[in-house]
Structure formats: C-alpha cells, structure tokens
Image (spheres, helix red, strand yellow):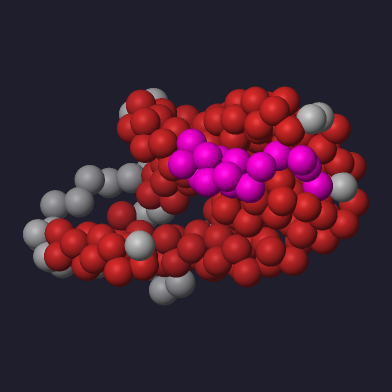
Amino acid sequence: MILLNAASYLGCGLLLFRIPAYPALPRPDREARWTVLRDRPFALIAAVDGAMGLQYPVASLLLPLWLAQHTPAPRWTVVAVSALNSLCCVLFQIPVGARVSTPGEGGRAMRWAGLFFLVSCPLMALTADLPAWAAVLLVLPAIAAHSLGEVWQSSGSFALGFGLAPDHAQGQYQGLLGLGFDIGQALAPAVLTTLCLGLGQLGWLLLAVFFAGLGLLGPPLTAWAERTRPARVPAC
C-alpha cells in the first residue's frame, strides 16, 4: 500500500508537467511588495481556516482512537470509517465545489462546514454509550456528516484563497493560507487527543461548538474582506 501510494504521487507529479508555465504578473505601482502582510481580513480568514483544519485528523486519528479505546465497536469499524470518509469526499467534492466559486460562496461554505461538524461530533461522542452493533450503525452517519463538512470546508478554502487574492500576488496569499493550515495540522494531534480523549464526550461537544463558531465567522469575515478589495483591472 505504501508503494502504491508513492506511485500515485509520482503519477500526479507527472501530470503537473502538462500545466503551461505562465509568466508572473507585474506588481502594480505604489503597492507594497508583501501585500498579504497588510491584508488583515485575509489574515483572519487564514487563521480561521487553519483552526477549522483541525477537523482533518478527526477522521484519520481521533475517531479511530476513540472507537478503539472508548467504544465496544469492533476494530474493523476503523477501516469502514476510513473507507466511507474517502468515498464521500470523492463523490461529493465536485458537486459541492461546483456550487462554491466566489468568495461570498466560500464564506457561506465555511458556515455549512461548521454546521455539519456541529452534527457529526456529538454523534461520534454518543457511540461510547451504545452496544457494539449500535455504535457501528451510528458512527457511519456521523462520519458521513463529517465528510460533507470536510468537502464544504475545502471548497470554501479554495474559493476564498484564490478569489480574495490579487492576480499578481496569488503565491503570497496561498502561502499564508497554507501556513495557517500547516500550523493547525501541527497542533491538531495534541489538541484533539487532549480535548476528546481526555475529557471524553464533553470534549466532543466542545469541539462541535468550536467548529460551528469558526464556521459562523466565515460570512462576516468574507464580507469585510470583499469591502477592502480594490477594484480589479483586467490584466492585458
């Protein structure tokens, strides 16, 4: 499996050679070199996106540990959860992503993501109170809801990252967005395991509220960011 995964990365890398090499666009006169560092609305969006990115290890790390340590569900449930998560992302990424193409739609997508996590996290918590067969039946809709939240968040992140960035500074903006995401991923294992494995079901509820609150910040932060965008002049 590890070798097949490596081969898939190689295949994706080879496909990138087919992308044309476009020249960088010139920076407008009187504009600071590091535009993104002066863009406070986008910096907050990057922070929110990075914090909400804690949801990614929920399916790959936190939920498997929870199922193994806190529920009577059989160990093969971890495999079923991972497979269903992957299947949902494959099936719904394009249909959902097609509905999220502007920054405004991206902000609303973040809100939808938070609402899906608000549903999925309590369902995951409840699996500890059920017999094995019921825990298996409950964790499947829980991971399905979580996967839909994941798809909505990734779609919103793409729309915000590319839609709010000036044409000449796409690299800067993607770099800041990626930095926020990477910081969140670095902190995620310690935060998630301490919160949910340490506090149990209460931790899951706090995580649900945390994600929902971040999602609600999406539309107002996006509206603020759009108000501060300069009028775009089509590139020649």
Q: Which residues are magenta?
A: 70-84
Q: Residue at x 15, y 65 (%)?
A: 14
> Horizontal and vertical percent for residue 127?
77, 34
Question: Is 1 on the left-hand or right-hand side of 143?
Answer: left
Judge whether 19 appears above or below 81 on screen: below
Pick the residue in front: 103 or 84: 84
Q: Would residue 91 be found to the left or right of residue 108 on screen?
A: left
The picture quadrant where one finds residue 108 is top right
In the rendered image, residue 112, in percent from the top left (x then y), is placed at 59, 29
Which picture quadrant has residue 189? bottom right
In the displayed structure, does residue 177 sit left or right of residue 174? right
For the point 20% across and 51% down, the residue is 235
Which residue is at the front of the view, 18 or 223? Answer: 18
Q: Is residue 66 above or below residue 148?
A: below
Q: Nearer the viewer, residue 210 or 4?
A: 4
Q: Is residue 109 magenta?
A: no
